[in-house]
Image (cartoon, rainbow, N blue to C red):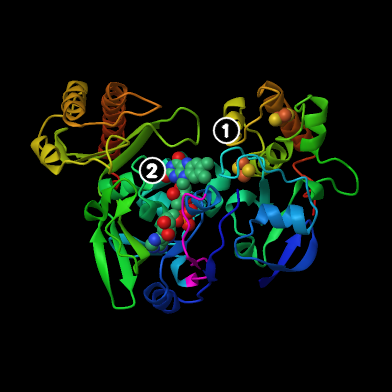
Amino acid sequence: MKPPAFAYYRPETVQEALQLLQKVNDAKILAGGQSLIPMLNMRLARPAAVIDINRLRELTEIQEYPDHLLVGALVRHYQLMESPLVRRFAPVVAEAERHIGHAAIRTRGTIGGSLSHADPAAELPLLATLGDWELHVASATGARVIPAREFFLGYLMTALGADELVTHIRVPKATGVSRFSEFALRAGDFALVSAAVSLNLDAHQKIDHLRLALGGVGETPWREPAIEAHYRGSEASPNLWTVIATEVADLIDPPEDLHASAAYRRQLARALLEKTLAETAADARQTLTKGGPAS
Amino acid sequence: MIPMTLTVNGQSYQLTVEPRWLLADVLREQLHLTGTHLGCEHGVCGACTVLWDGRPVRSCLTLAVTADGANILTIEGLAAEGILHPVQEAFWQEHALQCGFCTPGFILTAVHLLQENPEPTREEIREALAGNLCRCTGYQHIVNAVQRAAAALSDNHGHAPSGQ
Ligand SMILES: Cc1cc2nc3c(=O)[nH]c(=O)nc-3n(C[C@H](O)[C@H](O)[C@H](O)COP(=O)(O)OP(=O)(O)OC[C@H]3O[C@@H](n4cnc5c(N)ncnc54)[C@H](O)[C@@H]3O)c2cc1C
Ligand code: FES
Ligand code: FES
C-alpha cells in the first residue's frame, strides 16, 4: 500500500514549523519517517497534513555544555552512534544504538522521533528515563522543558500537545558508569525486554549512586527511584545484584503478547538486570582502580 | 506536485513528484529502475534498500520529496562499465540467490557493510544482514558470498569500485 494523500508542508525554520503546527489541522510531524511512514503505508495513520521538519538545520547538531549535551531533535540514530561527544559523555547511548533497527533504519530515524513515538520497547526512551534527560519543547505560544519521566504517559503516548515540537534534548553528562543490554528475537528487532543501569561505587566498594531502568515491561519505561535510594550504601557483591534483580522482577507487571508471556518477560527482566548490574559494577571498579573520571 | 532534483547512479534528474510518493515508487515508476524491489512496504524485509550518499535507506520508508538533492545508488548503478561489483560477483559464485527478489537489497546492504568494516566476522555479517529477508536460499550462501567479497576486496587493497 501507499500513503494516503495529505497536504504537505516543508518549513525551513523552527519558527515557520511552529506556526504551521498551530494553524494546520490534523497535521503530523515527519522526521526520519521510520515509524510514521510504515503507519502511512499501512494506512494506520491518515493525517490531513504532514509537516516535514527535515530542513530544520537548527535541529541537527550536538552541542557540548559543561554538564550536558544538547542534542537537536533531528540528530539521526547513526550520528548518535558515531558522535565523539556521545561516545565520550554518554557512551551508553552509543552502546544501545547498535540495537536500534538496522543500519538502514539508523540512517534516517531521529532522536526526536524516537522519543516522540514513545514505543515502550524502544531504546532511547529507556535511556532518557535512566539518565533523566529533558525534552525541550516549543509551540507558537511558548516553550517548556519536560523531564523524561513526565514525558512518557502510555503506549505511544507522550505529554506533547498537538501543536508542540521537540526541538532539543538535554542529555546530562554521565556521572556514573552506565551499561545497557536487551533481548530481542532477531538482531534489529524491537527488544522483548531491555535493561539499563547506572552505578558508582565509593572507595569502600559501597554503592553511592544507583539507577535502574527497564524497557518492554509496561506501557512506559520502568524506573523506581525509591528502590535505588534503598540500596545506596550497600556493599557491591554478586549476591546484591541477585537480590535487587529479584526484587524488581517481583514488582513489575509486564505485558503478555504474541512474542512472550508475562512470566517470560519477568524472567528476562530479572536475568538482564542481574547481568547488567554485574557488568556495570565491573566497569565501576575499573574506573575506581584507574582513578579516572567516570565515563 | 513538487519539483525536485535527484541524482541516481551518477545521473541527475529533474522530477516533479506528489508528496506521498515513496522514493521506491519514483525509482521504479518514473525512472523505470525496477531493480529496487518492494516486498513488505513497511521497513521489515530490506528488498527496497538503496544507498543515499553512501548509507543504506529503506526506499519504501522515504518520501521522494525528502530526498531532494540526494545522491542515490541503486543496484543498476553498481556494476561499473559492465563489470560486476565484487559483491555481485561473489553472490553469483556462491549461489547466494534463487529467485533474486531479495538480492538487490542484500547486495547494497553488504556493500555498505564492507565499506564500514572490510573484514567482518560471520557473526557481524549476520547481524548486518538481519534486516534483509530471503525466502528462498536460507542465509548460509549469502553469508558465504559476503565473506568471499570481503576477501576479494581486500586482495584489491580495499579499492572497491564505488559504482559511481
Ligand atoms: C524495521 C524497523 C525496525 C526498528 N527497530 C527499532 C528498534 O529496535 N528500536 C527502536 O527504538 N526503534 C526501532 N525502529 C523505529 C526507529 O527507531 C524510528 O526511527 C523511531 O521510532 C522514530 O523516529 P523517526 O525520526 O523515524 O520519526 P518519524 O517516523 O518521522 O515520527 C514518529 C512520530 O514522532 C513524531 N515526531 C517526530 N519528530 C518529532 C519532533 N521533533 N517533535 C514532535 N513530534 C515528533 C511524528 O509526528 C510521529 O508521530 C524501527 C523501525 C523499523 C522500520
Ligand atoms: S519493501 Fe522496504 S523494507 Fe520491505
Ligand atoms: S532469492 Fe528468493 S527471496 Fe531471496
The amino acid marked with disc number 1 is Ala
Tell me the number on the disc at residue B72: none
- Look at 36% across and 25% down and name the residue there: A260
Q: Does residue B9 sit above or below B113 in this rendering?
A: below
The residue labelled by disc 1 is B130
- On the image, the x and y values in percent for residue A66 come to 29, 64
Give the residues in magenta.
A43-57
* Front residue of this view, candidates A241 and A6: A6
The amino acid marked with disc number 2 is Ala
Q: CA distance from mark 1 to mark 2?
A: 18 Å
Q: What predominant SS class does the magenta segment belong to?
A: loop
Which quadrant of the view contains residue B101? top right
- Residue A295 visible in the snapshot: no
Tell me the number on the disc at residue A122: 2
Q: Does residue A147 sit above or below A13 in this rendering?
A: above
Mark 2 CB near ligand 1 (8 Å cut): yes
The reply to whether the magenta stretch includes residue A226 is no
Mark 1 is surrounded, within 10 Å at the Cα level, by few (under 14), some (14 to 19) or many (20 or more) other residues, namely many
Q: Does residue A246 sit above or below B57 in this rendering?
A: above
Mark 2 is surrounded, within 10 Å at the Cα level, by few (under 14), some (14 to 19) or many (20 or more) other residues, namely many
* Front residue of this view, candidates A146 and B114: A146
